[in-house]
Amino acid sequence: MSDNPRAADRVADKRDESDNPRRVHPLGPLVRMVPLASLEGRLYAVGMVAVVTALFVVAGRLHPDGYDQGVHEQLGLPPCGFLVVVGLPCPTCGMTTAFAHTIHGHWFRAIHAQPAGFLLAVTTLAIGLTALMGLLTGRRPVFNWYRINPVTVVWVGCVLFILGWGVKLLLYLLAHRAA
């Protein structure tokens, strides 16, 4: 052993790191909690909670039973123009239906209506819960964008959206071929 206490501490620190199964990533933690900046941060959280609550109230008042798409017409919107003209569902066909099914707890029906719509509903719920947590605790999560490439997040979202449309088209064609 050396007479230098700092050298002994460094050796002990290295030993502790090698014994620790949860190593620290060189770019830092993936998510960390930070305090809300100020009153504006709390107001932002209130706004997010209000928007998510409004979306869920509207979706909860819709009646998606018996529908794979077209629930948006209960909101006074016209039928899907793409479906009317082309005869196939558009990329967003079934989103409102999937959202309403998710809110009503019919998850398999939601996935059948539009898989991307189900993921959107679950993501919206997560955002609302995170905003509520921030409002109540005064802390919010911050992602380490050095570890998560935002471009990758966008590409994954696009691929999931396109895959959802592909599943929707496949289910639509199978249902209408059998009829």
Image (cartoon, grey):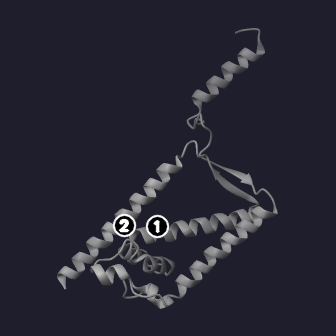
The quadrant holding residue 54 is bottom right
In the rendered image, the residue lying farthest to the left is: 178
Q: Is residue 167 left or right of residue 100?
A: left
Mark 1 element type: helix
- Tag on residue 91? none
Q: Amino acid at mark 2?
A: Gly
Q: Earlier in the sequence, mark 1 or mark 2?
A: 1
Q: Amino acid at mark 1?
A: Leu
Rendered location of residue 5, percent (x, y): 77, 15
Do callouts 1 and 2 mark residues in contact (Cβ within 8 Å)? yes
Q: Which quarter of the figure is the C terminus placed in?
A: bottom left
Residue 143 against residue 126 in the figure, above or below:
above
Q: Determine the residue positioned at 48% across, 77% down.
A: 99
Distance from the alpha carbon under mark 1 to that under mark 2: 10 Å
Mark 2 element type: helix
Q: Which residue is mark 1?
A: 119
The quadrant holding residue 18 is top right
Q: Determine the residue positioned at 23% across, 76% down.
A: 173
Q: Determine the residue positioned at 38% across, 82% down.
A: 80
Residue 77 against residue 50 in the figure, above or below:
below
- Pick whichever, 79 or 164, lies toward us: 79
Q: Nearer the viewer, mark 1 or mark 2?
A: 2
Label 1 Cα crowd, 10 Å radius (few <14 / some 14-19 / many 20+): many
Q: Is residue 148 left or right of residue 12?
A: left
- Tag on residue 164? 2
Q: Is residue 128 left or right of residue 7?
A: left
Rendered location of residue 30, percent (x, y): 59, 46
Q: Determine the residue positioned at 33% across, 77% down.
A: 89
Q: Which quarter of the figure is the N terminus placed in?
A: top right
Residue 106 against residue 167 in the figure, above or below:
below
